[in-house]
Image (cartoon, grey):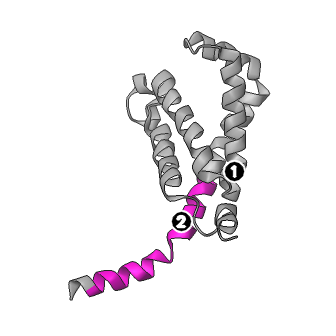
Amino acid sequence: MISRIDNAISQILNNFQSLFLLLARLVIAYGFYEPAMNKWNNIDSVGQWFGSMGIPFPTLNAYMAATTETLGVVLLAFGFLTRIISVPLMVIMLVAIYTVHYANGFSAGDNGFEIPLYFFLFLGLFMSHGAGKFSIDYLVSKK
């Protein structure tokens, strides 16, 4: 009896999976937009900052981070190559946690690693589950 109720509820709730994947993709894409634009608007300063944190090849890494974040905004928003772009964005989040946020603890209010961790986890969901039905990935896979 409980198993049938659970199955019925699961059938109903599964209808929301792609909607919430879309909303999560859009929110995460928007979350990368401002940091990407800030990097591009001040790329030399970002390179210097990266160098001050001991990041190797700081200017190259500043360009790579800005490019990856910008590409991530577009690809996540449209749900195109979602699984692929999620991996380098996850790397960026790990680097941000390690170099900037970890020393401040968990709390976002203290510039801790809370928010980049959430981004990392959402990107992990996109990497493992894909973009959902409301995406270019889904349309391409159907052809």
The answer to whether 4 is drawn above or below residue 13 in the figure is below
Q: Position of residue 134 (x, y in %)?
A: 64, 68
- Give the residue type at disc 1: Leu
Residue drawn where x is 72% and y is 34% of the image: 67
Outermost left residue: 1
Tags 1 and 2 touching, CB below 8 Å: no
- Which of the marked residues, 1 or 2, is nearer the chain's N terminus? 2
The one of 72 and 97 positioned closer to us in this rendering = 72
Magenta residues, dominant SS class: helix
The answer to whether 65 is drawn above or below residue 70 in the figure is above
Task: Identify the magenta region.
Answer: 4-27
Magenta-drawn stretch contains 30: no
Q: Quadrant of residue 143?
A: bottom right
- Give the residue type at disc 2: Phe
State the SS at label 1: helix
Q: Distance between the residues labelled 1 and 2?
A: 17 Å
Q: Where is residue 120 in the image (x, y as percent from the top left)?
A: 49, 42
Q: Where is residue 109 in the image (x, y as percent from the top left)?
A: 46, 35
The one of 32 and 15 positioned closer to us in this rendering = 15
Residue drawn where x is 69% and y is 47% of the image: 73
What residue sits right under mark 2 in the picture?
20
Residue drawn where x is 50% and y is 21% of the image: 99
State the SS at label 2: helix
Q: In this view, does 105 lie to the left or right of 21?
A: left
The one of 51 and 75 positioned closer to us in this rendering = 75
Residue drawn where x is 38% and y is 34% of the image: 106
Q: In which quarter of the image is residue 43?
A: top right
Crowd rating for badge 2 (residues with CA inside 10 Å; few <14, some 14–19, many 20+): some
- Can you say which quadrant of the picture contains the N terminus? bottom left
Q: Position of residue 56 (x, y in %)?
A: 59, 13
What residue sits right under mark 1 in the picture?
75
On residue 91, the disc is none
